[in-house]
Structure formats: structure tokens, C-alpha cells
Amino acid sequence: MRRKEKEPMLIATGALLVLLGNLAWATDERVSCGGQAQGAECWMEVANQPGCYIWNGHLMRNQTVTWTGECAGSLAQGVGTLKWVWAKGKKTSEETGQLRTGRQHGRWVVRLSDGTVAQGPFVEGKRHGRWVVQDANGNRRVIAFKKGKRSSR
């Protein structure tokens, strides 16, 4: 095949792979947050970008989320800020970092409404590694995580 004949086939193949990838995230064990119990893991629709989803590793009652970054193929992507609101607006967190296929990945900074600031890495939507947490009074502690669970290391 000549190059000009291959180009439409490559474009169609790429579009098909994107479509299949989006179907895969929506049809495997993961579910939408609608109707899920508190504490559930689920895909949550971004309030300011309808049709765009992010992974929520721990659903809170009446929780909403906004995202300042991009959305590609129905999943939030790239660098930006997540703003979570729950407890009838009394509790919030603002989290800045990178999303990869809708999940937090890499170094993040988390600011809670009570003045607490936490910094550390996520791997595929789960805290993993050393997190430094400082409360509003300046008290500092280090917490280790392994695949989203507190670790002794």
C-alpha cells in the first residue's frame, strides 16, 4: 500500500482504539457513583464538565467535584485542580496535580478546608509513598502509604 492509502486506515484504527479504551473503562468492574454507598470506589462525573469522569476512591455523601484541566475521551486528563465539596458544603478540599486516564498520578498537593495541607504521590488513583501532612497550627507529620493503605514504611 502507498502512504496516502495507509493514512485513512491509520486514522480509523486510532479512532477505534480510543473508542475501545473508553468502553473498557466504563464496562469493567468500575461503576458510576450514582446510587453508591458512602465509602464506595466509583467513577464520578465532573460537575463543571458534564460527560467527563474522574476516579473517586472514597465517595462521601452528597459529594461533588470540579476539575480545571482537560477532558479527553470522557476522562479528566493532564494537570489541573480538583475541588471536592461534601457535608452540605461545610467540607472542601482543593487538590492540585496530574490526572492520567481519570486517576490521580504523580505528586499532588491537597488543601483541606480546616487548613491542613498534605503533599505526596499518587499511583493510579491511590496514595503511594511518603506523604507530609501539616495542620493549621503548623504541626507536621509524615505518613507512609502503600497502594492506598497506611503503611509502616
Image (cartoon, grey):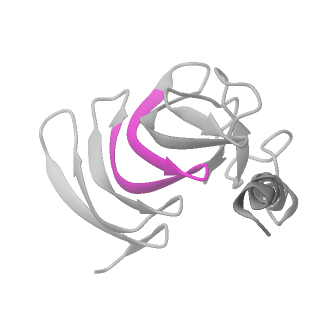
- The answer to whether 82 appears left or right of 121 in the picture is right
Q: Is residue 38 magenta?
A: no
- Residue 79 location in percent, x, y? 42, 40
Quadrant occupied by the C terminus: bottom left
- Residue 151 location in percent, x, y? 37, 76
Q: Which residues are magenta?
A: 92-110
Q: Is residue 109 magenta?
A: yes
Up-down relation of residue 89 to residue 45 (above or below): above
- Residue 64 location in percent, x, y? 64, 28
- The answer to whether 14 appears left or right of 35 in the picture is left
- Residue 29 location in percent, x, y? 82, 66
- The answer to whether 41 appears left or right of 100 in the picture is right
Up-down relation of residue 139 to residue 84 (above or below): below
Q: Nearer the viewer, residue 84 or 98?
A: 98
Up-down relation of residue 113 to residue 120 (above or below): above
Q: Quadrant of residue 25?
A: bottom right
**Residue at position x 71%, y 53% from top?**
40
Quadrant occupied by the N terminus: bottom right
Up-down relation of residue 142 to residue 115 (above or below): below
Q: Nearer the viewer, residue 59 or 81?
A: 81
